[in-house]
Structure formats: structure tokens, C-alpha cells
Image (spheres, helix red, strand yellow):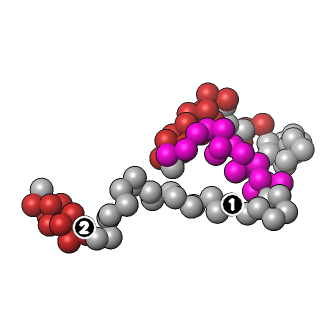
Amino acid sequence: MAARRDAGGVSGSDRVSEHELDARLRHEAERRDTTVSELTREAIEVLLGARKGKRHLMAAAAGRSGHSDISERIEEILRAEVKR
């Protein structure tokens, strides 16, 4: 007998628990320095197709440090890291 699959083609054993999904969303939102709501909105746009005229890059700002002078200070930053 074949495994039952939902409308998305996912079998029952492949599903992620609500608690695990919540934890993963919160972790990813924190990593990207955004909200769970914004991350969810972006994921839905990717799944259903972005609205016409407005495209989002999921990786945009993924490496944002919050500092605007990183490229100017790269030598100083690298020296400090090497000394550690």
C-alpha cells in the first residue's frame, strides 16, 4: 500500500511538527535579522509566485552586519581576527 500524501505531495512521515517548524522559522528570521512574518510572507511569495512588479530576493541582506563601513575597515577587522 502506498503512503498517503497530502495535496502538496508530502507523506505523513515527511511532515515537520508545528514546534519544529516554528523553531526553524524563528531561527532563520533571527539569522536574517527580520521578522517571522516577513520571512513567511517571502516564502509564500516564492511558493505562489511574486506579485507582478515586485520581486524579492530571499538572500537580500542575508549577510547584513548593521555596519555601513565594513568595506572601508576590512584590513583593521582582519588584523583583529588574526590576533585572536
- How many residues crowd mark 2 within 10 Å: few (<14), some (14–19), many (20+)? few
Q: Would residue 3 appear left or right of 13 to someone viewing this image? A: right
Horizontally, residue 47 falls left or right of residue 58, namely right
Magenta stretch: includes residue 39: yes
Classed neighbour count for the residue bearing mark 1: other residues with Cα under 10 Å, few (<14), some (14–19), many (≥20): few
Identified by mark 2, the residue type is Arg
Q: Quadrant of the N terminus?
A: top right
Q: Which residue, given by chain and number where applicable, does mark 1 sit on?
A: 56
Q: Earlier in the sequence, mark 1 or mark 2?
A: 1
Which residue lies at the image location 86% right of the left edge and 43% below the top edge?
5
Mark 2 lies on residue: 73
Residue at x 32% of width, y 64% of height: 70
Residue 36 in which image quadrant: top right
Front in this rendered view, residue 82 or 54? 54
- Magenta segment boundaries in residue numbering: 33-48
In what quadrant of the picture does the C terminus appear?
A: bottom left
Nearer the observer: mark 1 or 2; the answer is 2
Q: Which three-letter amino acid code belongs to the residue tagged 1?
A: His
**Going by the image, does 1 lie left or right of 28?**
right
